[in-house]
Image: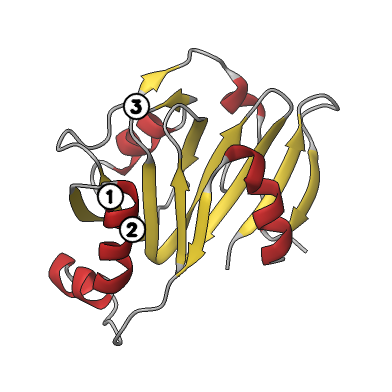
Amino acid sequence: MTILTVFDLTKGRGPQAATRDEREILKALLPFDVRYERWEASKPLAPGAGQDAVLEAYARDVERLQKLGGYQSVDVVRLNPEHPDREAMRKKFLSEHIHLDDEVRFFVEGAGAFYLRNDQHVLKVVCEQGDLLSVPSHTRHWFDMGAKPFFAAIRLFTTPDGWVAEFTGDKVAETIPGYDASERQAA
């Protein structure tokens, strides 16, 4: 289940609150207009299952979301600590950016941290297996998969271009503890 840590930018950069309580997480995400859901596979998946098996196991939820959001393309991305491009891929996502498209991710395996920012707060949302997070277009955010990434995620896009970022140039991401930081284990 998701772990949420709130950083109040008006009171410094330290974490102000952390929770796994789904009601509190939904309440905190509301001002960001972020969709958060929990999904279950329609049938058991073997660890490391391929794209076709993953998409078949979550077909009902994927199709529902495609209709709701107008998403035209779907794929599965998988990263592990041995992936040869893991460091370059991590670095690509660590700077604050926006998209003209929603950033929709469902975590089939493993975990990663999305950071969402408005003028007052940064929310660190550690998504784990079973978590869907949809970050609306134009929302300032970044993603940290950690130094030893391990996750498989379904991605949905409205355009065939896939992941295209516009970087803000703001250095706020460098001031907030990353995915591997100790507060990852919220109370």
Give neighbour class at mark 3: few <14, some 14-19, many 20+ (Cα, 10 Å): some
Going from N to C along the chain, the mark reached first, 2 or 1, is: 2
Q: Is residue 145 visible?
A: no
Q: Which residue is mark 2?
A: 65
- Asked if the residue under mark 1 is in contact with the one under mark 2, i.e. CB atoms within 8 Å, the reply is yes
Q: Identify the amino acid type marked 2.
A: Leu
Give neighbour class at mark 1: few <14, some 14-19, many 20+ (Cα, 10 Å): many
Going from N to C along the chain, the mark reached first, 3 or 2, is: 2
Q: Quadrant of residue 40?
A: bottom left
Identity of the residue furthest to the top in this view: 169
Q: Identify the amino acid type marked 1.
A: Leu
Q: Quadrant of the C terminus?
A: bottom right
Residue displayed at 55% across by 15% down: 170
Q: Which residue is mark 3?
A: 100
Give how far apart the Cα atoms at labels 2 and 1 are: 9 Å
Q: Is residue 121 visible?
A: yes
Q: Identify the amino acid type marked 3.
A: Leu
